[in-house]
Image: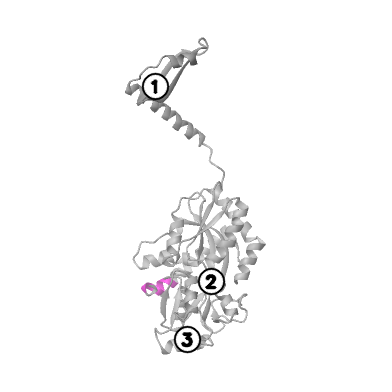
Amino acid sequence: MFISQCLCVRWGLTSVAYISCANSSSNPSFLKDFDMYPLYLSRLTFLGVCLSALAWGLCSNAFGQSTPAPFPSKPITMVVPFPPGGVADIVARPVAEAMGRDLGQAVIIENKPGAGGGIGMGFAAHAKADGYTLLMALSSLSVLPQADQILGRAPLFLHKDLRAMARFTADPTVLAVKADSPWKSTQDFIEDAKKRPGAISFGSSGNFGTMHVPMEILSQQSGLQLNHIPYTGAGPAVVALLGGQIDAVSTGPATVVQHIKSGKLRALAHWGATKLEALPDVSSLRDQKINAEYAQWSGLFVPSSTPEPIAQRIRVSAKSAALDPKVIEAIQNAGSPMAYLDAPEFDRYLNEDIKRMTEVVKKMGAKGM
């Protein structure tokens, strides 16, 4: 067998290549001979040897990567398309912690607010479909692509870009005002709004978002003209309400229940069909003869082309989190009972929600801006 050896060294300012060919079985002095006969290679020969070595290295690397690393082998990002303090963030944090324990890798929250949640949702929808980017979305996901189309804008994402993994909560939004406001009931609020069209303001998490749509439903059913002030999320909108910059919000119980119980805010009604567990003394709009109903859900998604084994691993981990007593307690303490749906059930629920909310958005039209 003949063996070729190539060694490149720096000798003064000259690159020198040594080469020796010998029969290793018959010439035991091969290594000694190697240092005794330096030969200056031509540039072409030297380049060929180096390229051969490079090609061998690349091939070796390719063969070494033929078996993919088990999932997950690095930290996972969970995108929350709203600022801290809102329902999505409140749900995401205990869920991410529990999933991290189950998966054996950290699940890191990354807040990406803007455009009623559309920026973060679009980022996650178009992320690499390898399981390392998750999305904790709210029900604004159901309406944003249609809203963009109605307004003549290119959608930031389409529903087909995302795959549902789990629903965690589904709460009716709550109509909240400052405790020292003149409105003691929903009827007070409606009567005043009719007397002063456009004078009463409400804050939202963005155009066509989960705080905007229910107020538009109420306005349509009651013949109101309200002044819509969009913020980047529920957290900033509630802060504005507490500070007196706006008059009202419609938001999930988790973002206002502590302020209601502390006496800073007053709940006038909620958009649910049944009694609200977090605020049992607050009646629904239906109970007050107003045909307005809306649920703000939170759910986990992955890019739609995520490989099936990885998607199923995430689905199982999400279910484990939903059943974790620590997660249930954390969400419950925030004012939102767990309302878990597994992927197939959540997907059916989502499709129905999209159909229903599409009709609402069509009625809103460009007024949603």
- State the separation of the CA atoms marked 3 and 2: 21 Å
Observer-nearest of 3 and 43: 43
Q: Which residue is mark 2?
A: 295
**Percent position (x, y) of residue 76?**
53, 52
Q: Residue at x 47, y 67 (%)?
A: 140
Quick check: is 132 in the magenta stretch?
no
Judge whether 85 appears above or below 100 on screen: below
Mark 3, other Cα within 10 Å: few <14 / some 14–19 / many ≥20: some
Q: Residue at x 50, y 12 (%)?
A: 29
Callout 2 secondary element: strand
Would you identify the image quadrant in which residue 56 lies? top left
Q: Amino acid at mark 1?
A: Ala
**Which kind of residue does numbered mark 3 sit on?**
Ile
Question: Marks 3/1: CA distance?
Answer: 90 Å
Q: Quadrant of residue 207?
A: bottom left
Between marks 3 and 1 in the image, the one whose residue lies nearer the viewer: 1
Report if residue 1 is visible in the image: no
Direction from residue 347 to residue 208 in the image, left or right: left
Residue to which mark 3 is pinned: 190
Q: Nearer the viewer, mark 1 or mark 2?
A: 1
Quarter of the image where one finds residue 6? top left
Query: What segment is highlighted magenta in the picture?
Result: 360-366
Disc with the residue nearer the chain's start (1 vs 2): 1
In the rendered structure, the answer to whether residue 309 lies left or right of residue 208 reads right
Residue 252 appears in the figure: yes
Q: Which residue is mark 1?
A: 17
